[in-house]
Structures are given as structure tokens and as C-alpha cells.
Amino acid sequence: MITRKHLDRRTFLRGVGTAVSLPFLDAMVPAFAAPGAARPPLRMAFVYVPNGIDMRNWNPAYEGPLGELPRILKSLEPFKDDILLLGNLTHNTGRALLDGAGDHGRCCGSYLTGVHVKKSTSDIRNGVSMDQLVAREAGRATRFPSLELGLEDARQSGDCDSGYSCAYTNNLAWRSETQPLPPVLNPRDLFERLFGDGADLSPEARARNARYRRSVLDFVTEDTKKLESGLGATDRRKLDEYLSSIREVERQIEKAESDNQQIDPHMPKPYGVPADFAEHYRLMTNMMTIAFQADLTRVMTFLVTHEGTSRAYREIGISDGHHPLTHHRNNPDMMEKVAQINTYHVQQFAAWVEKLKAVKEGDGTLLDHSMIVYGAGLSDGNRHLHEDLPTVIAGKARGTIKTGRRVVYRRETPMCNLFLSMMDRMGARMEHFGDATGKLEGLDLA
Amino acid sequence: MGSPLRTIPWLIAACALARAATGPTFDSAVGPVLAKTCTPCHNASLASGAMDIAPFTQADSLKLNREGWDIILERLRAREMPPAGVPHPAALDAAIQYLTAEFDKADRSVKPDPGRVTARRLNRTEYTNTIRDLLAVEFRAEKSFPTDDLGDGFDNIADVLTISPVLMEKYLAAAQQIAARAVAADPLPKPLKIEFAAKDKKIRRVDLSTIEAEGRIDFDGEYTVRIGLPGERAPDAKPVTLGFWIDGRLLATKQVETKPSGLVYFSPYSEEEMRLFLPEGDHVFRAAFIGDDFVRGMAPADAYSSKKNKFLDSITLLGPFAPKDPPPSRAKIFLCDPSAGSACVDRILANLAHHAWRRPVTKAEVASLGRFVALAKANGQDTAHGIELALEAMLVSPDFLFRIEHDPNPADGAPHPVSDVELASRLSYFLWSSMPDDALMAVAEAGKLHDPAVLDAQVKRMMADPKSSALAGNFAGQWLELRSLNAIKPDPQKFPQWNSELRDAMKQETSLFFDYILRQNRPMGEFLDARYTFLNEPLAKYYGIAGVQGPEFRKVDLTTEERGGILSQASVLTVSSYPTRTSVVIRGKFILDNILGSPPPPPPPDVPQLDEASVGATASLRQQMEKHRADPMCATCHNKMDPLGFGLENYDAIGRWRTMDGRFPVDATGVLPNGKAFATPGEMRAAMRSQLPEFARCVTEKMMTYALGRGIAPNDRRTVDAITRRLAAQQYPFQTLIYEIVHSLPFQSRRGEPVSTLAAPRPKEIALR
């Protein structure tokens, strides 16, 4: 392959200095692996699956210590001691509340924001998502305040759901009420973002590049400020988005310079998007693991596929689209296929949990220092129910979550209560969030 | 709801209503019809179609619930209500007339409002095209930038085009890369060889005479493209045409002998070479023998035997080599020799900024760009590198990435014409999805573009330009949901004949069809029932149409009832199907959404969906659907959707003609929302003609949305009405729609944003209760 390696003009957002070897799935994490090193930080991630879950095969018949896991969760059996199953958490803001149809659009839009999103196909209005509130705090320490990832490309024509903009179903993370953060889908994009494009520059060329980039950013910042003064409120809002993104990129450059390390992920650079779902999932979660391990970020959201997706899972012999299947009106054949898709999704997730558990750091594993929520914005996809949302937390959150149990809360307990408790653990302490009525009790109690 | 601005005109309108005492009144013209014809079903207890007419029985409902009334009027005018079986009272027409007149009167007293478009970021297509026209550099934004979100069905809606930090990183990286490619200040590296060969599993065999490979080209430049051709054919075999494509675009062809060379080889093998310019980026390379009849019907074992066939086996690229001529981008940038001095450098920078920012630039702006040249020099690099850096900054600037328009007073809601220069960009991004060219810019900067004759001349010129095919790609691609074709994956078990070639051909057909109607200014009715289409050999065979040979598309006259108009094109039929089967519901909804402009409300949750398993096994699809519609909750909407979908049941889920659906004969009888019945797709098309006004209105609204970059709001009603009236008067010539939109108030004007009235566009779906 002809590469640009020997040319010195192509780098941007690359680390400065020597490459640090980071053997994947090994105990050699520079920051936190060595005995006596700083205590590993807490990491948080969300894995979102669309169109609800076949709840008959999700909820165990018992509460308390986890015994045999139901069919969909079966693949998490080996990690039973590392997961906490939560019942009866509700997202009331995802419900119609006089806005009519569009549960798919709403439930994804509101999932992490706790805001009843504005019903509009073009005037999008949501809230700041909790992962971004966390990123503002916990993200200060890392190169990327947060990473947004996904597996399915956005819809390119037609409408997404009943008068709701596709922005609500294409994105989980919202930086402001009007600025969604689109997930990165292509493994190669993620690779280059995290580890660079392989350009091997002399220190002088690197320094010169940094000077150039800074002057370009200064120029456009100045330019934008001049421009803004003559504009109306809505146009100014757009340019503010632009400026805040510029500032974020500047921060990343500074961070890359100061942490002075280039990470060698010990994996080949992926070429593009694999056709195989499991392979795509595996590639992305491999890199997500490294991103946590190397402390490139502490906050991630992973939008597996979109609400309303008609993806057919031929990998497991299902030719019908996912969303049409979930409107099964209790047809056993269709319900079976939904359960199979749900199971398949959890299997991929379990493989990621396994990887996180295999990474030793400090006095435990990467999984021990994480809380990874696996969930959906609907429980019953057939009836579009927003209560008893399927929710699993993997990881002990540095000992602040007691795993190996199922806890069923009072009906209609706001999901936002869980979010308040998670934000608290991540150092983003808030009094209120969404429709929370308080913190979620019992995460750390037996 | 009622912003102060909107309420005042309503008060005036209400007074006007009150004064009209001599003629018919609400109580004399409308009240009795409502009571007799509507109330029996649309009352509080039955509320058929979730609609209770009670709130509409008082005269003041005309001003209090205008949007509800608009929907009612639409149903009445389209003769959807009263439904078949309920008598159509003579007084109904008088009521419609009265209501129309009252609303017209009310609308006339409302001050025209052009609405407001937010500063619009270039979307991926616009970015790609703008870079092409600005610098003659091929950069494919859709391969590197995140997918733009859709609003109102289009990806150029200002409010949903946001900038995230990830996109900003991409913008910065793209600007750096594009500037470097355009200036081409660095020498090319030593040529290298990339080989994609069957033995390394680096090629994909698309069919017996087509191979494909994916790879990355890191430098613009010339490359030697070598195709490996093992084997030989029979002594009487004819030469074939070898073609080489990049990303679906045919770059070169060459005649190739296939008969034995006469030389004795143990293993015959030959190579063909072409020298081609290849642009930087990720590409799909394809090599094929075009129209290769020799392999037809050949078993794969024979087709890949070097004794029996000459076939394609590898693609090798060797390069980059410096092109004989300097890249065209350099001609665009270097108007003079920058080593001649700072006057030339300034000229270069001013010219670039003028084009990149699509507006005149000031001396101060040029001076501030000049600092990049100084910076490069301070870092030991030459002027060309400085210009490269300045170009990079221009491409990241909001002046490039956004289309920003100015109000004299941003807080003043009074309409004012956009400047000529702003109008030039509106026009070029509408017709070309790209920046204005020099001719358009010159007219605009001379202050003449608002002159209607000058504007028309520019529209005419621009439509004749090949760049206006952007309308087919971007407008039609989204209006008819053709872009979804790439995401649709028909079940390979049920549809083994589906492949990407066929898919691309389907898309091409509709795209060429749209382009033809536009360029030839055909009547819009031909979208519904044209007696011609555009086919190449594979697609013609697929349709069962004889006499079309070769891979090129051409206009073909249709002689049977099987095809005609967009609703018989495989592209549309496929995007409106499930992966495993057709869906009368999706197809019916597609027609209501995109053809008749009367989108059905979404289904309530918990509605039973079709019992898939029993379709074709125990009951025909129609029997299943009819059972479904027996449920009154489903009936209102499905009575409208399903009969439309049934009219297309002669086409399977990938658009093939059929007369049997599994074990059951196809029954394509159905009825339009206006009551016209049909029994075949041909009759359906003829019947659709009767809904030409609805179709024209639908397309007008969609195209206005696309042209303006915002959703259609109530204040646009007057514009839409006027346009559709003029279209009807001329029998719907398609170009008239373009001219009308370009001349319309919302396209030519804008207004500021009074701080107190941040009126948001209202959602499309309006609950009637």
C-alpha cells in the first residue's frame, strides 16, 4: 500500500513524542497497572439497543442474588457476579404526554437527557445528556471528554418517526439542547481518532504542524467572533456550536501535546466497516476497551442500532427487519425472532464485558472500575411501553455498586434517579436531573 | 401557538368575517352541512378517525382553529369526505366555496412573511461539490464526514445541520488534506505497486466477466492500471471491450483480443495497461468485459479455466507519477507567479477567499490571510506552503462552511430582499448543490440578480448546465427515497437475483427519468404515467422489455401496461417493500407521503401488524389485510393506504412484474382516496391523473422545503397556493415549478428575528381533537 508515512505534512491531533507500547489485554497499562500507581479512575458507558426487548425472556422470576439467568441474558452467566439487574425503572419523559405517536423517536431522544423532546422534524430541542454533564467534569482529565460510537449509519431519506427529526434517533449524546453528538461508526475512523493515522514525523515537523494548526484555529475563532456580532439569535446559536467545537478540538490538541504519548494498540488498522455485525461490534468494543484502558476517555455511549431500524439479522438466519418484527402482536413465531435478536445483541455485549474483565489494573480489573449500563428506551417494543425498562449494569464501579443481584424498585421509579446516582459517582454532583425524584437507593446495599 | 404577530392579523380577519353579512354566512353555508353530513360520524362519542367536528361548528373556529380547518378542507376538496356510501349533499360545494373565500380573504390581510432560514452549514454533498468547483479537487465528503441528519425528509435543513467536535476534527483534517492536494507543493513520493489478485483473495468476482477491489490511493496522480487476463477463448472468439471503473464511474475502455495468440504457452496469460489519473481517497476499482456474450451460460468451472476462457484475474496499480500537465487546481490557485512578489500573493489570496466565501472580500481580510504566508516563511517554508496554509484556514472558516445571510437589523421582523450575492448562493445551492460560478457571481456583484429577466436567464443557463443533475441526485434521491436503496437488503433466499448492479441500475433509471422531465420541461403528470422510461440491457431484461442492448441507459418507449411512471419503477417499488415481501401499507403510505401529499397519521402503539406467517400459506395478502381493516381502529387510515398499495401488487418486493403471489393470483383492484376505482396498475395510473393537483402541491411543498432549507410553515401557504395555481394554468410544466420557487417571496427575501417571537415551525402531524 502506498502510504503517506514518509511525508511530513499530514498530522493532526496526533500525540507528540515517543510511542508507548500498550499490549492489548495485557497487564501493562502505563497509568494504572503498576503496583502503587494512582488508583484507577471510574469509567462509565452506555450500550443502547432499540425497539425494546422481549421482556418474558429478560426478567428473572426472582429478586435478590442472581441464580439462573433468563434466556436473553444467558451469555452473561459467567459474569453473574459482575452485573446488577434493575427492575421497574421508567422513563416517563419518553411517553406521549399529549404529543401523540412517535415513541421510538422520543424514547431514544430522551434516554440520556431525561427531557421530553420537542416534536418537530426540523426544529430540534432536547436537553444536555447526562454523559455530557459527566464529560464536563470527568472529561477534563482525558484527551477525549467522551466518545460516541455506533454500528448503524443514519437513515438517508424518508422520515424517522411520526414527526420527530431523525436527530433524535440517530444520537444518544447531546452536548447542548440543540447539538447532538453523532456516533462514529467506521472502525477505521475510530482507530485514527484514538491512535493516529500512522504518520511518523520528526519532532521539528510535529512542532511546526502544531504551530500551524493553532494559527488556523486562532484565525477562524477571530473570524467567527466578528461574524457573530451582526447576527440574530438563532444564527448566533449555530456559530456558538461551531466555536465550542473549535474549542474542544483545541483542547484535544493541547492534551495530546501534554500527555505526550502515542498509543500503539497492537492491532492492525481496520480497513472500513465490516459487513458482519459481530465483527463490527468486536472491532469497536476492542478499541473502546483500549480507550478506557489507556485513559483516553472515561465516558462512552454506544448506540448499537437505531430505534425503528429495519436491519435484518441474516447472521442468525433472520431475514425480517428488526422493527417490523417487534410489532408481533403476540405471534409466537415473530416473538421468537425478537428474542433471538435480543439474545444475539447481549452475546456481543457479554463478549465486551469479558474483555473488560480480562484487563487487570490496580487491585482488580478494568470492569471493576467501570459501570456499563446496557439498556433500551422501551421495554415492550410491541406496545411501546416506557416502564420497567430493561437495565443491566456491568461492573462494580470501584466498589460502589454491589453486583450479583436483581433489584426491583417501586413501579414508575424514574430512570433519572439511576442517572443522578451514576453522575454522583462520576464526580458530576447534581441536585436535579430530568424527572428524578432523588438518587436511586440500594445500588451498594445487599 | 398565537404569537402576537400572528394574532393581530387574525383580529382583522375576524372583523372582515363579521362584516360579510349580506352574502352567505358560516351559519347559512357551512353549519347545516356539518350538522347533516359530518356530525353523524364525527361526534364526541363515535369520533370516527379520531375526529370530533363539534369544535368546528361555530364561526369563530375559522380563526381559532385554522389548521384543523385546512385539513378538513383538504379532505373535502379531495372528495375523501364524505366517504363512499354517504350521500354527497349539493350544499357541500357551496360550503367549500364559502370556506375557501373566507380563508383567502383572511390570508390577504396577513402581512406576507418570508419566514426565516437559520445559517445553513454545507451538507456532505454540498461540501463535495463546492470543493470540486472551487479547486477542481475530488474529495468525497460522504466517505469521511458523519451522515447529516434529516429534517422534513431532506439533509439540507438548516436547523438540523449541526457541528459536533467530531465533525470539526473532520473539517480540519479535510481542509488540510484538500489544501495540500490543491496547491501540490510537495513532490510525489516514489511510485509503488499495489496488486489486487484473485490468488490473494483481494478481488471480488461480481460476475463471470467483472472483478472488483477496494483500496486506498494516497496521492492524486497518474497511475499505470494493469489488468491481468489469464486464459484464451475459442479461435473464432471476437475481441471484447475491457472497461475500468472507479467508484462506479467508467474511466476508460480498450479493445482486447481473446482468441488464442498463436504462441504456445503452458498457461496462457496477457495483460492490458492503461495510464489514468486517480484521485486520492478510498475507492472501489472495477474491471470488466463489457457486454460479454461469450461467457453467457458458462459454468463457473469453465469460465475460470484458462483453456476455455479468457477472464479477469487481477488489478495492479503502479504510481503515482506526476501528470504531464500540472493539476487543474494549480491553474485555479496560481493566477500569477507568487515569487513575483506580495502583490501577486495578495491577488491569489483575494481570489481564493472571494470564491471560497462566495462574497466580495475586504483588503483587511486579505491582509489577515497574508499572515499565513509570513508564518510559513518564518518556519522555513516557501510561499506556496503559506498559500496552502491560508487556503486551509479559508476552508475551516464559517464563511466557507456556512451560508450566512445578513439582516440590516437582526431583531426586526420586517421582510427585506436578500442581497444579490446571497441570492446567488441560494440559487446555486438549490440548482447545483454547489457554489455560484463566475458568471452568476458577476451578475450578482453587479447588483442585477434581483432583476426578474436577469434572474430567469441565470436559471435557464444553470438548468442547462450538467451540474443541475444535482436536483435528480439530491432532491429526487430524497423525495422518492432512492437513497434508502443502499440500505435495503432484500432477502437473498427469496430474491437471489438481487445484486448491487441491479440496484444501481434501478436508481439510475429513476434519476434519469427525473432529469429528463426537468430538462425537457415535461408536464409533471408524466411522473405518474409517462409512456417512456430509461433502461439499459440488464434492467430492460429484468422488466421483460426486448430490444435494449448494452450497458448504456437510453430512453425507451413503453408499449405495455406493465410499466409507466415512477410508481412502476423498480427503485420505488423496492424501497417501499420489506426485505422478504411487499407491503401494501408501506407502498400506500409512500404514495400518500410522496405523491399525494396527504401523510396518514402514524399507527397507535399496540396495533396488530400483519400476520406474516400466514400470508401465502393460509390466506392471500389481501384476505389478511381485509381482516386487519375490519378492526375499526385501523380502518380509517388503512382504508386510505391499503387500496393504493394493492394497486401495485403486480410488482414484487424488488419490483418484478408478477401475476401470482405465492399460491394466490394477484388482485390489483383498489381505489384512490377520491373514490376513483381501478383494477390494474395501468388503470391506477390513469386514475392518479385525476389527482394531479394534489400531486403538484405535494411536489411543490417538497421542492420548496429543499430549496429553502427549512420546513414549510403556515405562512408559506399563500406562496404554495399561488405556485400551484400557476402550474395548473399551464398544465404543470416542471421547469415552471423551479422558476416559480426562485421568484417566490420566501426564496427572495428574509427577515430578522424579533426577540420576543422565537416562533418555532409547527410539527407536521396535527392532532385533530
Image (cartoon, coloured by chain):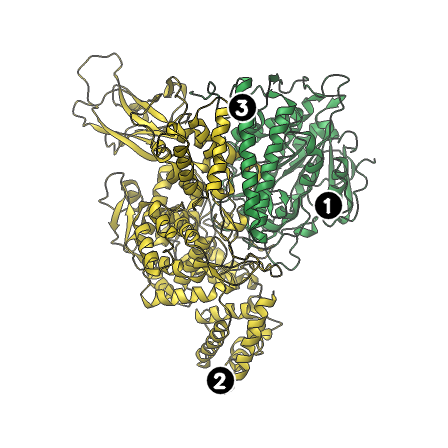
Chain colours: A green, B yellow
Query: Distance from label 1 to label 2 (Cα)?
Result: 58 Å
Q: Earlier in the sequence, mark 1 or mark 3?
A: 3
Question: Is A156 drawn above or below residue B37 in the view shown?
Answer: above
The quadrant where residue B284 appears: top left
Q: Which mark is nearer the camera, 1 or 3?
A: 3
Q: Name the residue under label 3.
A: A208
Image quarter where the N terminus of chain A lies is top left
Left or right? Give the position of B202 relative to A325. left
- Is residue B65 or residue A138 the one in the foreground? A138
Query: Distance from label 1 to label 3 (Cα)?
Result: 47 Å
Left or right? Give the position of A439 relative to B723. right
Q: Which mark is nearer the camera, 3 or 2?
A: 3
Q: Mark 1 points at which residue?
A: A416
Q: Mark 2 points at which residue?
A: B24
Q: Residue at x 35, y 34 (%)?
A: B335
Amino acid at circle 1: Cys
| Local crowd size for mark 1, using a 10 Å CA cut-off: few (<14), some (14–19), many (≥20) | many
- Is residue B646 or residue B623 the one in the foreground? B646
- Is residue A295 or residue A253 the one in the foreground? A253
Confirm whether residue A278 shows in the render.
Answer: no
